[in-house]
Image (cartoon, rainbow, N blue to C red):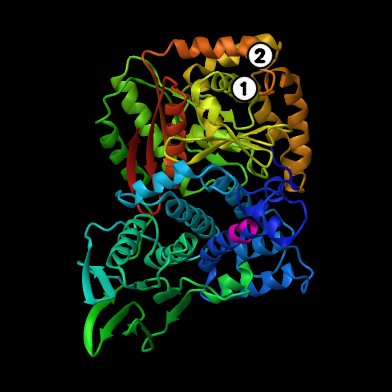
Amino acid sequence: MILTTTYRDRTVASRDLLAAYSPLDHATTATLPAEALDSALERLVRRLVALIALHGPQVPACFLDALTAAATGAAPVDVVDLTAAFLERGTAEVTGLPSELQQELVHFSRIVDLGQLGLHTGAAEHALRRLRGSDRLPDALKVLSELIIVARSRLIQRGRALPLPWLRSEGAVESEVADDLTTASPTVSPDYWVVVRCERRRLRRQFRFELSALLEYLTPAEAALALWAHCHEQRLGVAVELAVAQVDATTGTTVVAWRHQPSGTPGRDAFGRVSDTLPAITHLPPDTATTICDHQVRSTGPTSAVVTEAARVAAELSAPAAVAPADPADLATRACERLAAYTGPEVVSMEAGHIHLDRDLDADQDAGVAIGAALLGMLAARQRRPVALTPMMDDDHVLVRLTPESYRRFLRRTFGPVPMHLICESSPIIRAIVVALFQRLRNSRPAGHLQRRGGNLYLPLEDGTHCELFEDIDGAATTGCVFFEAALLIYRSAPKRFDAYFTDRYQLDAGVHEHAAALLSRHDRANAAGGHDTTIAALQDYYRRFADVTNPHRPDRHITALVNDVLAGADPVYAHLNVLEDYYEVQQHRVRALLNLLDLPLRLVTVHFNATTGRLALCDG
């Protein structure tokens, strides 16, 4: 469980930033060569720029100026606090309040953005070669899009008016206007235009495909920024120039343009290299123009623009109708239609309405529970076995603000009085299952592939990525999120049995999760006064009574026997259903890869939704 000081050791600016906003903690960066540290820092700063650009065209440059001053000691401010201020508010004003986005980014990165630094890369390189011939986004680019979605949704929740993506039923028309130049715009009601300049046609087409695929999640301008960061991360050996003109009802005409050169400026540090290559982001007032790649973009009104080349009109753009939030009832209906095609084993449990307790309830939870309630009713009508409702709240990787009691009341308003197992992510029951699962792993074939980076333990997956099993394996041994999810699915296969075992073994007056939730709710006043650490101290004091079953170095034979017996009862597998936002797609893919590698009799079906665009996807395997 994190405290207000977690990931906040003060060493040097580069290592502090990486620890606070990436999976490279202080223990890991302490052993990195200077060149590797510099490369990792540049990658992180480019990603931060893509997020901070949500606050406005000039904010990334202001951020880099302030960050450089803080890192060199010219300004007396902590680089982590400064970055949090720009992420949260787009200014250098440090408030001292907890940063929700800092917590989100470091947690999310440790799940899906591990990279290969310090880990064996052969399998990953093979996977990357396969990926280039595939029809899906590279994981690194998809992860960056998910980070942008999270940051945008938090800002909108606080009242910010930002352009929103929308689902497009038609593709784009592509034109080769020169030997090194490709342009494209939608075939119907075009609202954006893109141009890519590169001497390699294959790369131009790759950028076009990636931008088109990103539009399921991002606005065209956001996609252009994501591609900028991704292009530099790949360190392509050829020059690339890309520009996007976007028209929307919120900001009018926006142009994002950037250029990648194979060789950077010699002698520049990571901050300088990013600053040298910042995208040009321009909001064009009506009747103003800018030129990109030999094309002129002119704003012709508050919500219209025209693109011309040599006096020829290349595209006429107009803003789409205002994007209304998706209707939860419509999402629920479409989710039932998708799940109707499911022909697998009966579903054992369902999680819906997932929440991080550092934030207020919002449209994501409204949509999640609406979908979940509809699916629960549908499954009840077609299954003999009732589906266990197993919502999970993250109190483990966040500075807790929302109380479990408030969350429980929210769930009851939609689900009613149906039986429910409300699970704390800090749960010692799940940690005990993790220990048994780790013992099972060490006795299996994949055990020979375990790897360390810093004090952390990783398992390579068959797709070339890595799963963090434990952070600080020889100390606190904090469970990695994907490994936790595998153990959580085992718990969800027999929640009553696990709850009863702990209640009987430890002679408890109340269930573990119920008591933990009560502690978190009881300390609401302390939280409001900034007493998160006090709350966690009380919870950890309660959890100490279970220390004999939660140490991965000392598996408990009784817990191991219970886990093995539950798994042996699968017929032939336990099928579980998750209802999650679509920025969890990479995370859920990792969970399935781990289940397959460990040969667990668990099947994970996920309904992914987007409460903004109305996108809905069913993933099963």
Image coords of residue 109 (percent x, y)? 56, 48
Is residue 455 visible in this depiction of the protein?
A: yes
SS at circle 1: helix
Identity of the residue drawn at 77% across and 74% down:
74
User: Callout 1, which amino acid?
Assistant: Val
Span highlighted in magenta in the image: 36-40
Q: Label 1 belongs to which residue?
A: 435
Q: Up-down: is 567 above or below 59?
A: above
Contact? badges 2 and 1 (CB < 8 Å):
yes
Q: What kind of element bears circle 2?
A: loop
**401 in magenta:** no
Whether 38 is among the magenta residues is yes
Q: Dot 1: within a 10 Å radius of its alpha carbon, few (fewer than 14), some, or many (20 or more) residues? A: many
Residue 91, picture quadrant: bottom right
Of residues 239 and 244, the one nearer the viewer is 239
In the image, residue 427 above or below residue 49: above
Horizontal and vertical percent position of residue 336: 29, 34
569 sits to left or right of 403: left
Q: Quadrant of the N terminus?
A: top right
- Indicate left or right for 583 with 515 as reference: left
Mark with earlier residue (2, 1): 1
Tell me the CA gap for discs 2 and 1: 8 Å
Using the rendered image of the protein, determine whether residue 409 is visible from the camera's viewpoint.
no
Quickly name the residue at label 2: 556
Please give the name of the residue rendered at 29% of the width and 75% of the height, measured from the top-left corner: 180
The three-letter amino acid code for the residue at tag 2 is Asp
Query: In the rendered image, which quarter is residue 76 located in?
Result: bottom right
Residue for point 62% across, 56% down: 36
